[in-house]
Image (spheres, rainbow, N blue to C red):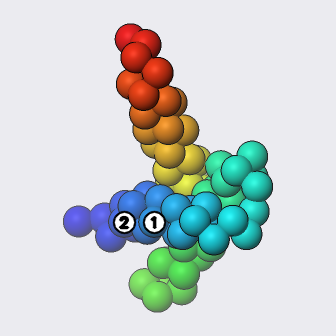
Amino acid sequence: MEWNLFIIPVTNILVELIKKTKVASTNWLPWIAVVIGGVLGAIYAAVFKVDYFVYIVEGLIYGASAAGIYDATKSSYVMIKNGKE
């Protein structure tokens, strides 16, 4: 099993915590998710002693995926709330 796949849900959780504390503007949250993904990828590479470059890039991609999941969920919620299909 690829343990680095847990980067996506962990990134989502961390971004939600940042959002709740209002440390950063919501406009920055997708970029913050990408950075968090890269950092988590680097941590994964350090712990499992694998190639840093590969796992940092994967972490950045997973962070971008987490940002996309966040945006898609948010837009769906707004559409449902406003009664639009």
For label 2, the crowd category at 10 Å Cα-Cα, with few meaning under 14, some 14 to 19 and many 20 or more, is few
- Residue 11 visible from this viewpoint: no
The residue where tag 1 is placed is 13
Residue 26 image point, x, y percent: 70, 50
Q: Residue at x 73, y 69 (%)?
A: 23
Mark positioned earlier in the residue sequence (2 or 1): 2
The residue where tag 2 is placed is 6
Question: How far, Cα to Cα, is label 2 from label 1?
Answer: 11 Å
Q: Residue at x 61, y 61 (%)?
A: 19
Determine whether 30 is above or below 22 in the image: above
Determine whether 44 is above or below 77 in the image: below
Q: Return the residue nearer the eye: 12 or 6.
A: 12
Q: Return the residue nearer the eye: 72 or 40.
A: 72
Q: Amino acid at mark 1?
A: Ile
Q: Amino acid at mark 2?
A: Phe
Q: Quadrant of the N terminus?
A: bottom left
Residue 27 image point, x, y percent: 75, 46
Residue 49 image point, x, y percent: 48, 85
Q: Secondary structure at mark 2?
A: helix
Q: Residue at x 48, y 78 (%)?
A: 44
Residue 85 image point, x, y percent: 38, 11
Q: Residue 64 vs residue 69: left or right? A: right
Q: Residue 9 vs residue 65: left or right? A: left
- Residue 47 visible from this viewpoint: yes
Circle nearer the viewer, 2 or 1? 1
Q: Residue at x 39, y 61 (%)?
A: 9
Q: Return the residue nearer the eye: 83 or 35.
A: 83
Q: Quadrant of residue 41?
A: bottom right
Q: Secondary structure at mark 1?
A: helix
